[in-house]
Amino acid sequence: MDHLLFLLATGLARGAIFALFALSLVLIWRAARIINFAQGAMALVATYVAFAVTGLSGSYWVGLTAGILAGAVIGFGVERGLMRFTKDSHPLAGIIVAIGLVMVLQALLGIFFGQQHRPMQTPFSDSPLLWGDTPLLSPYDLFVLVVALGVMGVMALLFNRTSLGLQLRASAFAPEVSRVLGVRVSRMVTIGWMLSAAVAALAAMLLVPTELGLNPHSTDVLFIYAFTVAVVGGLDSPVGALIGGLVVGVAMTLVTGYIGATVAPIGVLVLLLLVLLVRPGGIFSMREARSA
Amino acid sequence: MTTRTATGAEVSITGLTVGYGGEPVLHGINLDMKPGEIVAVLGANGAGKSTLLRTLAGLVRPTAGTIDLFRSDITGLRTEDRARRGLALVPDGQSVVAELSVDENLRLGALWRHRGPARARAIGRVYELFEPLDRRRSSAGHQLSGGERQMLAIGRALVAEPTLLAVDEPSLGLAPRVVADLMAVLRDASARTGLTILLAEQNVTSALSIADRGVVLSLGRIVADAPAETLSNDAALRHAYLGF
Amino acid sequence: MNRIAPALTGTRRTIVFGAVLTVLAIAGTFGLDPYRNFQLATIVAYFCAVAGLTLLVGLTGQLSLGHAALMAVGGYAYALTANLATDWGLDGVPRFLLGMLGALVVSTVHGLLLGLAGARLQGPYLAGVTLAIAIALPAVTAQFSGVLGGDQGLQIAYEGVPEIFSRLIVVEQWHAWVSILIAGVVVTALAAVRRSALGLKMRAVRDDETAARLSGVPAARVKVIAFTLSSVAAGAGGAALCFVTQSISPGAYTLAFSLLLVVAAVVGGLGSIGGAALGAALIVLLPWLVGTVTDAFEMSADLEQRLSGNLGLLVFGGLLIVVMLARPGGLASIGLRRGRGRTAPPRSPSPFGPAASAAAPTDSPADEADTDRTGVKEVAVHVPTERER
């Protein structure tokens, strides 16, 4: 029972990260109708920036800030430098160019930083706090939960309560009408990418310290989990991303805790296949199916 | 609707040719509009009415010709910059943003023009103009009736206090009474603010009822350009191009 | 090709040219040393998988990011069946045929299941599902290590040269023969499908799914069938590779390898079987070339370790981006341009719109070795851009 409580609590913290990363996929999907398969690699580059800055400055917080900014800059560069040009090309160009970008970024990381795992520091202890005699969340897990949920709250406010958010939503839903109304749609798409990449960078920076460490493939699995979360929750639905993330996080932690770590990727795969077979629109989506 | 006295735009379209790759859809269109004038663009399906309006708004690039607004060339401007020069297009198909609420649609329209309390006042004036919308402020665009959607589309254009309003087939699929109301709103807006209006319509009677002038498009060329009254009374022309 | 054999048409012509090219390729193995024959066998096995992938992407507009894992499925099925056959006392050709049968059956079922989940949906779902498969493969082999052998994978019994050829050729050449035979059958079948009514339906679904449906094409079913075919081709390639290397392990079928197959399909030209052959050769030969070049420079052991693998990855990634943005038709479209002066008259518009006819089918698998100029012209895989539509 104690073990279960511990797993549930840890799972929520893990799930919050998946939800945050899935939210970043939803943001790009809504802004540009692209599933950005390079999101993991882009976030990883930002995490390396954070790692380097933390190393130089000695401060986790300076590194974290630098990483988030780097994420936004990378988002800007990728949208303006690459993705903008995929619109006029092959229908699959968005995905294929993203795959090419993954290969380029991972190769460059490998060349500059090597393949070894680099441990990343956490700002708070990662040994669990006790509740009575029961081990629960670690302070770091608590930090992760607060930050992830906080950022999602801020995003919700931004999108639903500000003029910028109104323009971002309008540009995503009806680009042509928005332009006719004077909205600078192409700028909105760029801002959507920057926001998304910054959020993804944050998610990666929160996750990496809890795993083996920093390595050019650290975010491969995170991307798959978040993709699954986004599919479970519905690609158009930020709320779906949140709930889906927590569900997948808890489920995977339970699977890992009771059966074994090797089963987790299989569990995700099974979940993904089941949702796509049974409820293709996503569990939390209003729409019936994603086939036209 | 008016607190400021806007001056209508002076428009000059010269030699406008538009093609989507094959045979041009518009051949050398020349069209001048005086400030405050209401011009009806008439013609059958496929005559090029929509293309003319979309080119005016910058959604389609012409292969030749120029568009002047207030005597300055806007042919090279992007759609969003044309909007900020006071050119408002109401696209066909009652094009509201279905996922946004009525209020959000109107706020979107007012964004670049008004800030702070002025924005709320401008939106309030649209609600005065279109009563039904006032009752449905928080309904999503897709929950509205066709008439309400068209009111919203026109209101959303007017809220930015444009100097040139281009409206594409506002009557399509709407009940005659609703059409008459919409036409009255357009005429009043023009009368009060001096707004210049370019109105593309297949519904000739409705359009000519408020227009000062009508131009008839056929296969991408202007085949008639005359005062509305003359067009209404020219049986031969009506029969040849307007089908009644 | 019409000039050479005007009487042959349709599927029959596809089969004849497939057979001719297979024989030519087998004859070609006599000109190669054992190591080159091993490389050829590998290229041809990859070719199987890339041909399946390129048809999936080019014809139905669906992308798979896990074709290496689908190869692994075929390879594991082959190894398990072949080892079973060994236990039954079979060897040689009967064991090989039984193994292939196992590989095909398992690949079909597996492809059908995945296709039902991902391929009938629109958009990037299949890409995500297949990516998940690629990531999950090591976990699956570890979890079922009793059957699949974990990280070590499975070994199969040594396949020597059959008695009748034993004076003529060495084992590497024999393996190349088998690989070529498998590819010959599989790719000819794919080329026939591409020319068939089914191929037309696939293109119709790609160009405009709604319009295709309104014309009575069962879009979801067509997409699932296309993915299953593609999965079977990949499985056959995996089986061929397993036969050649006499082993299979998850480490050989990583995500990186899956992405390389995408590179091969894209750089060769999406939808082009000739392009698939070029692409398969590229992904085998380019890393080898990069390795040879870097070996020529003096550098520290650390730098060498960092560059090894990554430099090739960098080149491939860059190539993928550049080709996709600058020339979405890939290498095949360059061949097309060169030969355009003498091309046959433009094809009449297909009932499904201009894009369907723009991506005209390859006439035959003849372009797999591509000595025939006419073949190059008719590869014609100019992938239509949004603007052209």
Image: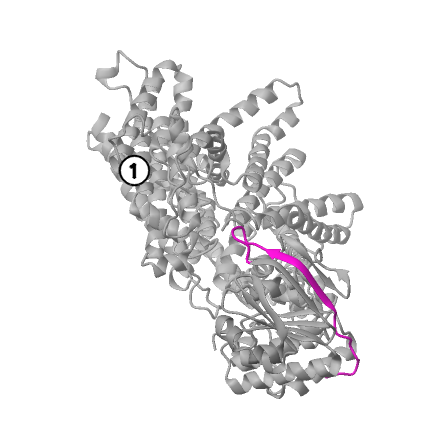
- Range of the magenta residues? B1-25
Q: Quadrant of residue B159?
A: bottom right
Q: Is residue B56 above or below residue B232?
A: above
Q: Main secondary structure of the magenta part?
A: loop
Residue C291 position within the rendered picture, expressed as x and y whole percent measured from the top left: 56, 23
Give the image quarter of residue C311.
Answer: top right
In this view, A273 is above or below C3: below
Residue at 78% in and 83% down: B3
* Point 42% across, 19% down: residue: C36
Residue B217 is inside the magenta segment: no
Residue placed most toward the observer, C336 or C122? C336
Residue C146, image x, y percentages: 35, 41
| Residue B144 visible to an observer of this rendering | no
Chain ID of residue with mark 1: C
Horizontal relation, residue B155 to residue A58: left or right:
left
Q: Nearer the viewer, residue B8 or C357?
A: B8
Asked whether B15 falls inside the magenta stretch, the response is: yes
Going by the image, does A85 lie left or right of C153? right
Q: Is residue C177 left or right of residue A174?
A: left
